[in-house]
Image: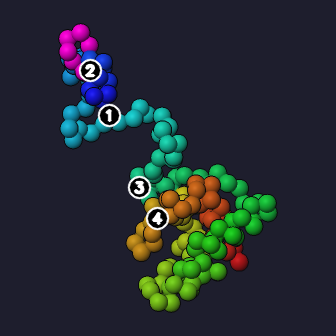
Amino acid sequence: MYTALTISGCGNDNGQIGDFRYRSDMADQPSFHKHEDPLPPVKGTVPVAGKELAISDSLAATRVANPVERTPANADSSKFLYETYCTPCHGLSAKGDGLVAAKFQRPPDLTTQKYRTTPDGYFYYVIRNGRLIMPSYYESIKSRERWLIVNHLRTLQDK
């Protein structure tokens, strides 16, 4: 009986329970249709997540300059990052003789003349997006850290 009295007190003068008015203007709004692509971002804007935009192709990547200088202050972190992410396949000396390479397809020797003359942006692009058997490290390695790895690779090539 208590429940019936409580529910009867919730109604309005018209006998309706609650305020369930339909808003007809909800159907008349600008919105995307099903499966419609969103509009492209305005040129020069930054993504909401704050992540870097993808470099669309490796040719464009070769034109990107390394913004992180090779300094003694960066040497330790560069070496640590290279040894953490690259050594399993490429080896300590970047010759493609890492532990993983012994059981699978061997990666290239990055100390050859071909790779010594390859622009820094190309290595950044490959670390970010992957290539052939190399996976993408986009989620694992931050942008600045990728440049530090490229710097350590250059140090190994100089030896």
Disc nearer the start of the sequence (2/4): 2
Query: Which numbered tag is attached to residue 39?
Result: 1
Disc nearer the start of the sequence (1/4): 1
Place of residue 44 in the rendered image (x, y in percent of width and height, measured from the top left)? 48, 34
For mark 3, give the secondary structure. Answer: loop
Callout 1: few (<14), some (14-19), or many (20+) C-alpha neighbours within 10 Å? few
Disc nearer the start of the sequence (3/4): 3
Marks 3, 4: nearer the viewer: 4
Query: Which numbered tag is attached to residue 136?
Result: 4
Place of residue 88 in the rendered image (x, y in percent of width and height, measured from the top left)? 57, 80
Disc nearer the start of the sequence (2/1): 2
Looking at the rendered structure, the kind of residue marked 1 is Leu
For mark 1, give the secondary structure. Answer: loop
Q: CB of mark 2 within 8 Å of CB of mark 1?
A: no
Looking at the rendered structure, the kind of residue marked 2 is Ser
Give the quadrant of residue 21.
top left
Q: CB of mark 1 within 8 Å of CB of mark 4?
A: no
Q: Which residue is mark 3?
A: 57
Q: Vertical placement of 14 versus 88: above or below? A: above
The magenta-colored residue range is: 12-19
Looking at the rendered structure, the kind of residue marked 4 is Ser
Looking at the rendered structure, the kind of residue marked 3 is Asp
For mark 2, give the secondary structure. Answer: helix
